Amino acid sequence: MNGVASITTNDRGHTDAALVRRFRQAATKRARAAAFDRVVRKHRDAVLGRCAERLWPDADAAVAYAHDAFIVAYLAMGDPAKLARPDRLRDWLVGIAAHGDLASGLSAGVDAVHWGALQASIAAGAPHRPDMRGHATRQESLRRWLEQIVATLPEPRQQMYDMFVRRALDSRSAATELGTDAAAAQRVRRENREAILRAFEVTALAAAEADPDPFGGGAGGCAELRQLLADGLRDGGMPGGVRWDSLVLPADLRLAVTSHVSDCGTCRDRRDDCMAQWAPELLPILAGAELNEQVIEDLRVIPEHERSRYWAPAGVHHRGGRGASAGAGAGGPGLPRRVAMAATGAGLLVVLLLVLGFVQPGFLVSASVPGGSSSSPTADPGSGGPQVTGTSTPTHGRTAPSVTAGSTAGAPADTGGGSTAPA
C-alpha cells in the first residue's frame, strides 16, 4: 500500500475545516501526507470529474490535470491567504481544477492561480452542496452497468478491472501479483482503463439509440446504426425497449458497432456527446485510486524548502510585513528569506578572505592576478542547497515533482482481444 492508507481508510465525520486544520498543524512531512491523503480521498471524485468535463475525451490528460491541481493545493493549502475558508475546501479544489493553466513546474503552477479571484468567487457563490443521496444512487447504478459491460470483455480485462477498480490495488501491490515491476503495472492499468472506456462509450451510444433522448438533448440518431442494433439484438434474443442504463451488447455486436462508428461521423459526434455526459462520473470510478496513488507518491519527492516557499511550517504564523520568512514580497514568495540567506553567505565569504589574507600575506593580491596563487578554496558544487529540477525521480510515468500535464496516449480500439497484462 502507499504507506498512509492504514490511517486514512475512513473519512466519515471529518469535515473540511477539520481536515484543513489537521493538515496545517501537522509537524512532519509524513503527517502532512496522511492528512492530505484524506483530502484527496474525500474530494478526488469532484476534482477528477471537473477535469473530465474540461478535457474529455482525453482521459489521460484529465487524470494528469487532476494530479496537478492536488499538488498545487498541497503547496497552497497551508496559507490562509490562499485558502481563507477551510469549510469551502471542496469549492476551492474544484476552482483550482477549473483553472486553465497549472503546468510548467511547481512554482509556476502555484503562481498561475489568481488566488484573490478564486477566494472572491468562493465568497460570492453559494456553497456547492451536491445531492449526496441522488449522487450515490446514480453512482451505484452506473457502477452496476459498468460491471455488466466489463463482464462481456475477455477474461484478462476482467481480472485487471477486479485488481485496479474493485480492489483498488496500488501499482506496487499489483506488480507483485502480476510478477512484474511497478512501471509495467502502471502501463497495464492505463491500457485496461482505456479498453474499458472504449467498450463503455460504444455501449452508451447504443443505449442512446435504444432511448433516443435519455438526457433531454433531443439529438437525432443514425438509421444505419439503429438497423445494425435491431438486427444484432434480435439475433441475440434480446427484447426491444431496453433501458438506456442497463443495455449490454454481446461482444460480437459491440465490435460491429465499433467498426461502424469508425466510419460514421454522425455516430462519432453522438458518441462524444454521450460520453461528455458520463465521463465526470465514470472516470472517477475507473481512475480514482490511480489518481490517489500518483498524488501521494509524488508528494514524497517534493523538497521541504519548496513547500516552505508558500506557507509557514506548523507553529509559525505570518504577522503582516514584519519579516515573516515565508511571506510573499513583491519579488515573489519567500523573497525576504532568500535575500537574508544571500547576505549571510556574502558576509561569511568576506570573513574567510580576510582570515586567509592575514594567515597568508599576499593571498588577496595573488588571488586577483591572472596566473597568481592557485591556493584559493574551491567552491563545493553542492553547497547551494537542494535544487528543484525536472530530473527528479520519475513516478507513474511522470517526472516528479514537476507539475505538468501527462502525455495523452491514443485510445486503443475495442478489438475484443485479451489484456496485455503479464500472465
Image (cartoon, helix red, strand yellow):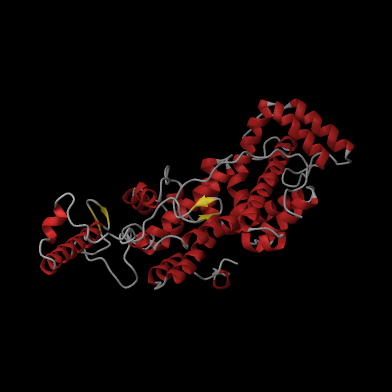
> Residue 317 occupies which quadrant of the picture?
bottom left
Name the residue: 76% across, 53% down: 158
> Residue 328 occupies which quadrant of the picture?
bottom left
Which quarter of the rendering shows the C terminus? Answer: bottom right
Name the residue: 18% across, 62% down: 349
- How many discs appear? 0
Name the side, left or right, on which 55 lies relative to 154. left
Image height check: is 304 above or below 130?
A: below
Name the side, left or right, on which 367 lies relative to 168. left
Name the side, left or right, on which 112 lies relative to 175. left
Of residue 364 and residue 235, the one placed in the foreground of this image is 364
Name the residue: 64% across, 40% down: 411
Q: Residue 145 location, x and y as percent?
A: 72, 50
Q: Residue 313 location, x and y as percent?
A: 33, 68
Res 127 seen here: no
Of residue 349 and residue 189, the one placed in the foreground of this image is 349
Res 34 seen here: yes
Q: Residue 294 location, x and y as percent?
A: 54, 57
> Residue 256 occupies which quadrant of the picture?
top right
Name the side, left or right, on which 301 lies relative to 350. right
Image height check: is 202 above or below 404?
A: above
Which quarter of the rendering shows the N terminus? Answer: bottom right
Q: Residue 170 location, x and y as percent?
A: 62, 61
Of residue 7 and residue 205, the one placed in the foreground of this image is 7
